[in-house]
Amino acid sequence: MMQKLSFFLALAKPRLSFLVVFSAAMGYAFSENSAELPNIYWLYLVLGGFFVTASANGFNQVLERDIDAKMARTQNRPLPRKKISLNAAIAVCMIYGAIGLFFLYLLNQITLYLGLVSLVLYAFVYTPLKKHTAWSVLVGAIPGAMPPLLGYVAAENQFGIVPGLLFFMQFMWQFPHFWSIAWVGFEDYQKADYYLLPLPGGKSKQNAFMILLYTALLVPCSLFLWVFPIENPILGDLSACLVLLMGLLFVYVAYLFYNKPQQKEAKTLMFASFLYLPIVQIIYLLK
């Protein structure tokens, strides 16, 4: 019984789900209104974010079960190994989604809709697009950037320039983050006929340049909260300097990769992207 439960948990990709929850929690904490809300709202956000992400991750594995069997990085997942049935996996994903959307509804209806849009875009638009076009990364960047927006709206119950800027920064971060992953796993992705790098040509200097370019573009995007709203910028000078420093370090790692576009350098850039986002989001809380 416990082993079966572990397979159902694997559908959720818990480590990835918790990273999404962390980003949503940072967006929630960034809202000044969050301090006035009942503490139970934190629990609603954590549970809602986790289970909606778990559902999206699970449906991703349902739709890609045959493809996952071809790739070394995914062939040990429960469905390729036939450790759980397809019907059971679908049922569990639906339950995950229902639980997650219920908790987001307890926050407010806008948060519920954002969670639903994220789930549908990731599982049923981004996932099938991966076999057809490299533009799938652009589509996947939308639900990938949704957590801080969702977290902020969960506290404010309305949109605004601040959650929009939080979304946009994480949206731009998706490109160097995901393209570095696509570079590291290029040969594996080819087995599944996935082409996720921005330009044709595989592990080329041109693709390395595109990754460097988008890493550089992330730097000004990360500082928009220091500029807007114009009358009363959200981010203070000290926080902006720290964010700028993080951005320049990230660009430096991307430049080292561009200068020597090899597997080791790509992995370094990939891990740098994992560190960059949470550190910057924590700095944002300093305001």
Image (cartoon, helix red, strand yellow):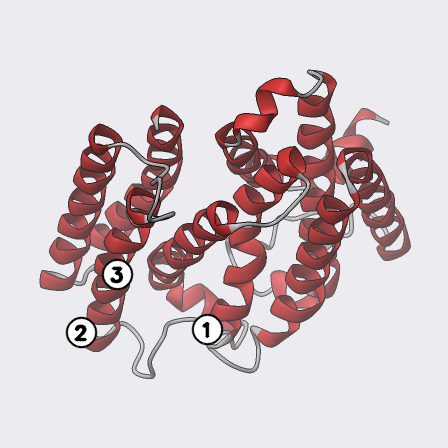
SS for dot 1: helix
Q: In the image shown, does 101 or 82 lie closer to the viewer? A: 101
Q: In the image shown, does 115 or 166 lie closer to the viewer? A: 166
Q: Amino acid at mark 2?
A: Lys
Horizontal side of 10 relative to 252 (left or right) equals right
Q: Position of residue 166 (x, y in %)?
A: 45, 47
| Residue 102 quadrant | top right
Q: In the image shown, does 226 or 185 lie closer to the viewer? A: 226
Mark 2 or 1: in front is: 2
Q: Which residue occupies 37% across, 40% down?
A: 277
**Mark 2 surroundings: few (<14), some (14-19) or many (≥20) residues within 10 A:** some
Q: Amino acid at mark 3?
A: Leu
* Residues under numbered marks 2 and 1 in contact, where contact means CB atoms less than 8 Å apart: no
**Mark 2 or mark 3: which comes first in sequence?**
2
* Residues under numbered marks 2 and 3 in contact, where contact means CB atoms less than 8 Å apart: no
- Vertical relation: 214 (above or below) 31: below
The label on residue 217 is: 3
Q: Position of residue 237 (x, y in %)?
A: 21, 33
Q: Position of residue 123 (x, y in %)?
A: 69, 61
Please indicate, yes or no, whether residue 34 appears anywhere in the rendered image. Answer: yes
Mark 1 or 3: in front is: 3
**Mark 3 surroundings: few (<14), some (14-19) or many (≥20) residues within 10 A:** some
The label on residue 205 is: 2
Please indicate, yes or no, whether residue 69 appears anywhere in the rendered image. Answer: no
SS for dot 2: helix
Where does the N terminus fall, quadrant-wise? top right
Residue at which label 1 appears: 190
**Mark 1 or mark 3: which comes first in sequence?**
1
Q: Which residue occupies 38% across, 66% down?
A: 186
- Vertical relation: 212 (above or below) 192: above
Q: Which residue occupies 34% across, 83% down?
A: 200
Q: Which residue occupies 22% across, 39% down?
A: 246
